[in-house]
Amino acid sequence: MSETKQLPLRNEVAEELTWDLSVIFADEAAFEAAIAKLQADLAKVDQYKGTLKEGAQAFLAALEYQLAIGRQLETIYVYTHLRNDQDTTNAKDQALYARATSLWAQAGEAIAWFEPEVLSLADEVIWQYFDAEPALAQYRHYVQQIVDNRAHILPAEQEALLAAAGEIFGSAANTFSILNNADLEFPVIEDEQGEKIQLSHGVYGQLLESTDRRVRKAAFEGLYKVYQQFARTFASTLSANVKRHNYSAKVRHFASARQAALSGNHIPESVHDTLVEVVNKHLPLLHRYMELRKRLLKVDELHMYDVYTPLLGESSLKYTYEQATQEAFKALAPMGEEYLAVVKEAFENRWIDVVENKGKRSGAYSSGAYDTYPYILLNWHDTLDQLFTLVHEMGHSVHSYFTRKYQPYVYGDYSIFLAEIASTTNENLLTEYLLQTQKDPKVRAYILNHYLDGFKGTVFRQTQFAEFEHFMHEEDAKGTPLTAEFLNEHYGKLNQKYYGSAISEDEQIRYEWSRIPHFYYNYYVYQYATGFSAASALAAKILSDDPQALTNYLAYLKAGSSDYPIEVMKKAGVDMTKPDYLEEAMRVFEQRLDELEALVKELEV
């Protein structure tokens, strides 16, 4: 009998493949000292509360006090969430994360008075302060955002109550995370060589790309058998989270949860509607791609476990992590030396947690605070897809690095709406690099297939998620119970609409909603699709002969939240209030689908 492949324990992973969190806090004493300092500063709140009416200097002092609280808190929170994510089974790290989450709620309650107190002042008084105190100048856009939100800020006592309930409001998402990442036990299946392998989130994604259909089917059925068992529990956590969004929007006098979620960054709701409208109009392109997939895989029925495997067999493009870092440098060369210097630092200074270990959070992300590295979490496998993941997350981290280097803390972050543009611009550059350097027709066909799959996953699939997310919020607002059965029925119909008649109606896919963590993020997913589409336009500009294009792009990376996202993107060269950038992305998809179909005919001859 062959032995079951097991994930390594956290302490068995080579240090150079882990992120270095000691640069945040060298030891437990340093962490506790930071906690103590924050708590001491929180105790000073009464020195600032109620003082904004006393003049420009008092206004400045209170503003900078509450920003300083946020800056300290973010560092503590990021440190504990990274430690927790590297091994969600570690009880000590779970406790640290719980402390930070509790502290976040306490701090939110302690400074909840600030915005209502700002809004207790007349606009003319606020701007008189700015005229009187030059040190306030850099905070003008920040305060303007508060003033613009005047209709949705509650009286101080009510803001404090909402802030104090932060832990309670977050409990549904926390329960989902623990159940999904730590408690679920997935079955052991056999891989292509007949060896037993423990199914996990990371392994599942890898196995769905297998060219062995038996393996794909076993992984698909094995994973969803577990989710079916817990569907009612997941429906309960998801429903509670949706109710939280709708409740918060209602008490803050928004017309809907979507309006509330998008208003913070002044994103018109029409941007969301236009995305769904344009993508739905072009669903025949996805249906055409599914028909091609069915034909090339030579199957009588195309199933959802068939939509990720390469169409032309195993790719010769496999990369170890070390090889991938070299390819990333080459692909990102059009970004220039200033950009590449940051990429080099990321690789050399252990910003990246590379390999999967037991209990590690699934997937990949970039995370950090103003005073930390912009860390990257990976779960590495030697595939082309992982190379794309690396350059994607590197896009986020370089964006964060430049933002924090060139902006003060008050603007030292950026909206998710902008974030996904930086990451997917890198993906587009990698695709162009591979198509330029790989001449073998079969390899080129594989790259085109990978691009089309990436587009399918980032534009079509994320828009499907966005449409489902909006449906859930609207139904809950109407009083419809979000039961597992109700969610299954609608998700199944939506999935069939997106993938078309070429796909068989797999019962299991109706449960997919139950395993998507992004449904807990509050109108997050649509930004993957808008971001990828905008990135197509920006990548084309960077690769053109226009030297100003890169300058404009780097200015976007350095802008942080110093202006509204739509305005930042206009300066970068893309107007996202219009459908043009989405139509352009669809034209690229169609062009590369045409090229793949022609290449396949050539290979068949």
Image (spheres, rainbow, N blue to C red):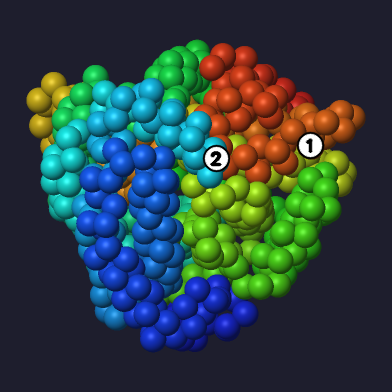
Q: Which residue is mark 1?
A: 551
Q: How many angstroms separate mark 1 from mark 2 (CA)?
A: 30 Å
In the image, 11 versus 101, the foreground residue is 101
Q: Vertical placement of 428 versus 345: above or below?
A: above
Q: Position of residue 221 (x, y in %)?
A: 34, 52
Q: Vertical placement of 390 versus 305: above or below?
A: below
In the image, 535 versus 494, the foreground residue is 535
Q: Position of residue 59 (x, y in %)?
A: 37, 43
Q: Which mark lies nearer to you, 1 or 2?
A: 2
Residue 282 lies left or right of residue 33; in this view the side is: right
Q: Report the amino acid beneath label 2.
A: Pro
The quadrant holding residue 566 is top right
Q: Report the amino acid beneath label 1.
A: Thr
- In the drawing, what numbered circle is on residue 43? none
Q: Which residue is mark 2?
A: 134
Judge the density around disc 2: few (<14), some (14-19), many (≥20) Cα neighbours within 10 Å. few
Residue 268 lies left or right of residue 593; in this view the side is: left
The kind of secondary structure element at disc 1 is helix
Q: Residue at 75% across / 64% down in the picture?
A: 344
Judge the density around disc 1: few (<14), some (14-19), many (≥20) Cα neighbours within 10 Å. some
